[in-house]
Amino acid sequence: MTVVKSPLPEPARQVTHDALQSTLVDLLGLSLIGKQAHWNVVGPRFRSVHLQLDELVAAARGYADTVAERAAALGLPPDGRPETIASAFTLPGPKDGWLRDEEAVRVIAETLGTAIARLRERIAATEEPDPVTQDLLIGITAELEKQRWMFEAENISG
Amino acid sequence: MTVVKSPLPEPARQVTHDALQSTLVDLLGLSLIGKQAHWNVVGPRFRSVHLQLDELVAAARGYADTVAERAAALGLPPDGRPETIASAFTLPGPKDGWLRDEEAVRVIAETLGTAIARLRERIAATEEPDPVTQDLLIGITAELEKQRWMFEAENISG
Amino acid sequence: MTVVKSPLPEPARQVTHDALQSTLVDLLGLSLIGKQAHWNVVGPRFRSVHLQLDELVAAARGYADTVAERAAALGLPPDGRPETIASAFTLPGPKDGWLRDEEAVRVIAETLGTAIARLRERIAATEEPDPVTQDLLIGITAELEKQRWMFEAENISG
Amino acid sequence: MTVVKSPLPEPARQVTHDALQSTLVDLLGLSLIGKQAHWNVVGPRFRSVHLQLDELVAAARGYADTVAERAAALGLPPDGRPETIASAFTLPGPKDGWLRDEEAVRVIAETLGTAIARLRERIAATEEPDPVTQDLLIGITAELEKQRWMFEAENISG
Amino acid sequence: MTVVKSPLPEPARQVTHDALQSTLVDLLGLSLIGKQAHWNVVGPRFRSVHLQLDELVAAARGYADTVAERAAALGLPPDGRPETIASAFTLPGPKDGWLRDEEAVRVIAETLGTAIARLRERIAATEEPDPVTQDLLIGITAELEKQRWMFEAENISG
Amino acid sequence: MTVVKSPLPEPARQVTHDALQSTLVDLLGLSLIGKQAHWNVVGPRFRSVHLQLDELVAAARGYADTVAERAAALGLPPDGRPETIASAFTLPGPKDGWLRDEEAVRVIAETLGTAIARLRERIAATEEPDPVTQDLLIGITAELEKQRWMFEAENISG
Amino acid sequence: MTVVKSPLPEPARQVTHDALQSTLVDLLGLSLIGKQAHWNVVGPRFRSVHLQLDELVAAARGYADTVAERAAALGLPPDGRPETIASAFTLPGPKDGWLRDEEAVRVIAETLGTAIARLRERIAATEEPDPVTQDLLIGITAELEKQRWMFEAENISG
Amino acid sequence: MTVVKSPLPEPARQVTHDALQSTLVDLLGLSLIGKQAHWNVVGPRFRSVHLQLDELVAAARGYADTVAERAAALGLPPDGRPETIASAFTLPGPKDGWLRDEEAVRVIAETLGTAIARLRERIAATEEPDPVTQDLLIGITAELEKQRWMFEAENISG
Amino acid sequence: MTVVKSPLPEPARQVTHDALQSTLVDLLGLSLIGKQAHWNVVGPRFRSVHLQLDELVAAARGYADTVAERAAALGLPPDGRPETIASAFTLPGPKDGWLRDEEAVRVIAETLGTAIARLRERIAATEEPDPVTQDLLIGITAELEKQRWMFEAENISG
Amino acid sequence: MTVVKSPLPEPARQVTHDALQSTLVDLLGLSLIGKQAHWNVVGPRFRSVHLQLDELVAAARGYADTVAERAAALGLPPDGRPETIASAFTLPGPKDGWLRDEEAVRVIAETLGTAIARLRERIAATEEPDPVTQDLLIGITAELEKQRWMFEAENISG
Amino acid sequence: MTVVKSPLPEPARQVTHDALQSTLVDLLGLSLIGKQAHWNVVGPRFRSVHLQLDELVAAARGYADTVAERAAALGLPPDGRPETIASAFTLPGPKDGWLRDEEAVRVIAETLGTAIARLRERIAATEEPDPVTQDLLIGITAELEKQRWMFEAENISG
Amino acid sequence: MTVVKSPLPEPARQVTHDALQSTLVDLLGLSLIGKQAHWNVVGPRFRSVHLQLDELVAAARGYADTVAERAAALGLPPDGRPETIASAFTLPGPKDGWLRDEEAVRVIAETLGTAIARLRERIAATEEPDPVTQDLLIGITAELEKQRWMFEAENISG
């Protein structure tokens, strides 16, 4: 069922679709991982990391919404169902159970690093097909790189 | 690793853990399903359903947080990772792609009906082991029953 | 016309319906009585009682809404029409015309006392059929008992 | 008991009293009718009508307060007790039970039409006796006419 | 120096000027009297009267501003200097020193009664010359009559 | 297509329609003119005039909305399309390009003067047919006269 | 009169001027069209479409302001006068009189589609001459494409 | 002096009184202890613990108020005077002087553990006598258990 | 009638009374003068001076309240009645009628200069008798000196 | 353990410590006394006194925090533990049980009078050793003297 | 010490570092210059320029923060120390002492012009190495060009 | 150019000028140093110290503004230009590059200690010449001493 007309011609549309759909899965998964660490973190830095993770979750959720609605605006129905995340999400995440604070910080910094590398590829890929989508991906990258710095800076051991 | 001491004795603890962990999975899944429908709904009632679904998602997210933190407060690390949702979430949900408004309303009302039936079982199960957890589940049920009514009332055809 | 499906089985449904419908009538009547006194009170304590009554009205209106929507959520259409209040409302209230401040305080305290006694019966009656409704009635009772104390405390003569 | 002195001479006072007291009854009844429809409406437009009715109720309550306090300011104790509404309220309203959305919109538009016609008579009647009261009635009419338009515009069938 | 052109022809302009200038003096004087009572009131009702008087002052100041700017808008420079109030203000006011609460309420109610009577004359006088100014005076009268009722209602002795 | 029933009988309806439709065109045109000057003003008073013009635009837009919705409420579909403004708008406005501050102030004061004169005619014309519409026109006139005074006061040269 | 110095060299300046001036006219016209539909829409979806159109108008007005001020910042006086819109605005719009809801949604979606196609041409044209202006046009396109999706999604018939 | 009538019969009243009065003393003492630690904490986690303690104090103060007013609403005058706290408060607390951060966290977690155990006994004791009071104690327990988890999670050493 | 006990012994009390009463008269007069200029200012700087004067009036009114309540707190009934201001206020002020902007700025700067000189004498006079009053006078002086600078800075001619 | 370095030399430090520690105890005790009266007051002025006492408690709590943090800033660990208040607090306070309104007002006014007398001694004592602390004590005195006036003014019998 | 890993490869990193570090120095210096003019400006336009400069300072400070944190996010420690600004800041600025309003406006417009020219070079330089940084520089340029226009427009002499 | 008249006689003026100008330089330098540490801090306490430093910067910036405007109010043009800070700022600060958290805390505590010692000298110096300025310096000292305590308390090693 083709429902919403797309302002993009075909090849551009497919490239943009891939970039947005894979970003959506990364961001939804990131929001689940962030909450998992938010709830299970323990250690002397509990409160600080607990609060910091909620800011990451808020950013991930906000951008997931923008990305999904961007896809819809291009006539591309986004897919963020539990089964899709289950099969398509591949970023590293925390293990089950309580999580030491330095481990939480380390794993989130690593996850963000991987997510950022993928976003930079998608920025390059969408420049020609759709500069509007590229601009959105640039904005997400700026925010995630800022958050990654904060987790990295926090994980410098004495 | 037993990290946070529990104010509950053992058998009560296990029953409460089951009730909270399964409620957490239901609520996280519900928040993903709600967003999926929020993005993909089409039809004359698009705007109304689109907005209504976001209120459902906000409620589901807020309660998921409270439920997970309640588990942690009882010394029970909650599990809301993507892979856990993938394997444990069993409520019905929308299919892939654009979703007609009446179908969106119908599937959400059905999902809520199933979730509510499970919550009422957990209310009964936690009365003795932990009235504090029971009180939380009662509050969630009240909200989801209100939301279900609104989706049902909206789905009466002419 | 059965429109909204009920999560409650039949006998429980009838008991809960009675509790909610009679509470709705009490609260709507209370909001009218409270406004009547709010407008007609005179005497040295005019301003204080005038303002206090508006807080009572706000509470009564808010709970009336919650109670009516709880009934709807259970598949029970609530009835708050003028003619229903006219025939079903039986709490004591102020007479016509200007109302001395101590008389206003006395009659409201008496009305609240009667309303609370009825609510406590409904709390007992709904415990088994629907703990979610019981929890709502407990919350209303707590608020009305607090308001009753304030009117009683204010009516101690020198 | 004559308590609050009136700034109006006698014949003007009686005309104004009649205009304000009957407007008060109309507005209080309207707020009850509006809530009744707010709770019992069903159909595809449920959410839209549900929200719209709450704006009507808020307007009716706010103006009822202003009208009653205007009466008091003129030395005329207003009467908004349940029994007064029961005997004096004559605007059409919804029947008991669930209410189809187009029926809810139709009955409210009709009620507003009747209320407006009466208000326009009172505007004419109070011009000489009390231009201050007339100005208040003009303001109420402007708001109710705006709300009536919205309900009417919504009820145009395809 | 004629500086701001007036949208009113000459005779209308003079009548309107008189109405606005004398209302300005009444309102400025009222704001000073209200503050004087606000500071000097004593007695069991101190707090209630103290707060009520500040609402009167806020209303008087707000309307003084509107009245003066209305005069300016008509090309009529308003005069609210201390010496003008000293010579032109004639409403009754409190004496020097501490002021018993019932005396404060009584004197303010009396002052408002006098101010209202003058405003009603000006409403009649400005109907033909400038309905815009009349509408403003009607609004001020409505507010002062409401405030007068509250002071009167409060001064009913037991 | 007669869609929304009118609370006004026929001759009154036509007079009121003319008053509202021509006021709508004046206000929409005024909002465009105000923005044009807001963007193109230059000179030492740039910032002050730039900000002042935005307040005028906000007022014009707000009143245009109220006027158009008042027409709709009377069953009279308002017309604010670009082509209607193009053919019906006749108030003076600024020329193309940069605009010196004193020239901006002068032309806006002149435009407001013309608009006010027309509004005063419509106030007289609508008194009998519809006092509710008249009251709205009085309110608009009060605001525009206040704004005109401010522009005039600002344009007095040294 | 060259007043504000431009940070752009000549050929770049002309291209950027054309892009901004034509975008300004489109946005101002769009805001007028949006309001016209906002006031004249009728049908079962009245309230939903009425509110949605106001969000479109708010976006169009906000971007018109940004675009005009961007032109000024480049030393290019923007032109948004009624006569300019009359002669330069060419997007499709609604006809005179009441407007059925599905027709309102259809015409706005079509208008937005045309506006977006023009914006995408201007994004390409300004990339070299002024990336700052291009970035602004990208932001406008993202918003209008999102709004177009919502109108399109709403217009899918059963 | 029996002043405020109680809605509870006698034996229920005494049990409820004991539960509320002892909870009041625990909460007031907790608020003093929390502030003491808030002011005297030192160490690398100073800022984090300093802020966290203020959230505990805010919760303790808020619940103390609710508990005391609940007692008053039941006709039971609450006692929170310094001398009562001095003689009746028995929860463990910090020693005099500067307090190392891990010691502050440890002592507060221990205090909360003791307070929670007592609250759970009172929840059991008040179930029959007064479910309204029980509901309040359940709410307090949920909050204190959440706060205890956060302090415990923070005190896990490396 | 000595009503409120004073925390000050007699000679200190008299000195403090004089300082506060004369400051009160200065501030009330200043607020009247500031409004007079606010309404009557004309000239190219109209808007800027008009707004600036309202900030002065707000400061003067706020401090007048604090000063009068400080007097009351010391058992000294403050006197701010119209007749007192008429006889005791001696600061320079604007003449009747329209007021050129530079003249408005000049006269206010001069008035503030005189008021400040008097305040500095009272700061010296109250140091021993009542450092609490002195601290209040210091705060007023800081604010008035800041405002005077702004008016002075604005009055430098080209 | 000397932890935080002090900016004060030794003798000054001891005087300042005594002033701050005794003020802390007075303020904490005052906040407990204020709440006790807030909960137990009865009589016609209940509502007014109930609200007024909460403002006193808010002020006392806020200043207690500032005073304790000032001590810490000077390297002096503050002591606000329950046992310290029990042994060091000596201001008069209300007896156990319900408290008549005039008695509540009387005892609080007396308590404030005693607290103020002590504060004035500490203002004198800290002038030389630490003007920063003196300035804080002056601010507290100003507030408490204002509150005392209000309670005194309220306690004037008829 | 390499602490925070960079998502950029080496040559790109150096170019981006230079662009960000020099922009940081420009913005910090601009915020100091803006405040200097804000405090020292005199002349008839004092208030207008004084306020406008604070908006420039707020923008400069906000962007300085974003730029510095962007550098940190790229693993490049930013340098904004006083000595760095002293040696590296080269934009023109105001001289010492009072500053005539037209001189303040002129010097700030000139400073902004220079800063903008440099920013446009950095936009070109960072397009390939890091589009995320380029996007940030584009945003800063848009804001500074808007502010420059306003200062330029304000400085057109009569 | 002497522009703003000073309320202070000559010798007092010079002393006050020195105190204010040197405080201005200290505060502006402090705000730069605080931001430098805010951006470059790394280590486990990163987030806590990062946020705490921003509160210091906000305080320093706010006081710098007040101090500079106080100088202007005394007719003394303040000097906060980059070159002035470069030559006059002498407080210790962080070195270039990443900064370990304990080092950041240590250097800021040291800087604050030095700044406070200088402020206390200026408090003594300004007591006679200008108590208004002294009061401002006292307020700054109170705030900086509070901040210094927090950094010191945080730097106690285990």
Image: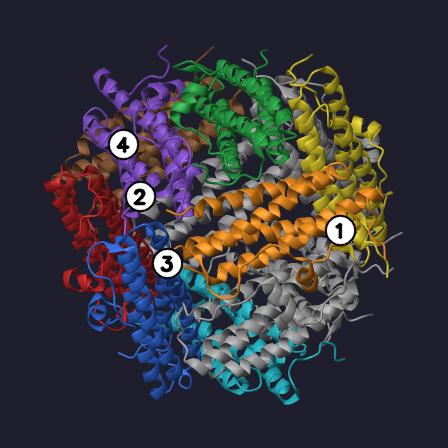
Chain colours: A red, B blue, D orange, E yellow, F green, G purple, H cyan, K brown
Q: Residue at x 73, y 37 (%)?
A: D127
Residue A118, compared with residue B58, is above or below; it is above
Q: Which residue is mark 3?
A: B158
Most foreground residue, G37 or K119:
G37
User: In the rendered structure, the residue with mark 2 lies on which chain?
Assistant: G
Q: Which residue is mark 2?
A: G151
Q: Give the alpha-carbon distance from disc 4 to disc 3, as whole Å.
A: 37 Å
Q: Which residue is mark 4?
A: G115
Tell me residue A19's x, y (percent). 16, 48
- Quadrant of the rendered structure where residue F86 is? top left
Residue K138, compared with residue D7, is above or below; it is above
Most foreground residue, K5 or K152:
K152
- As helix, strand or loop, the secondary structure at mark 2 comes to helix
**Disc 1 crowd, CA 10 A, few/some/many (<14, 14-19, 20+):** many
Total numbered badges shown on the rendered structure: 4
Q: Which residue is mark 1?
A: D72
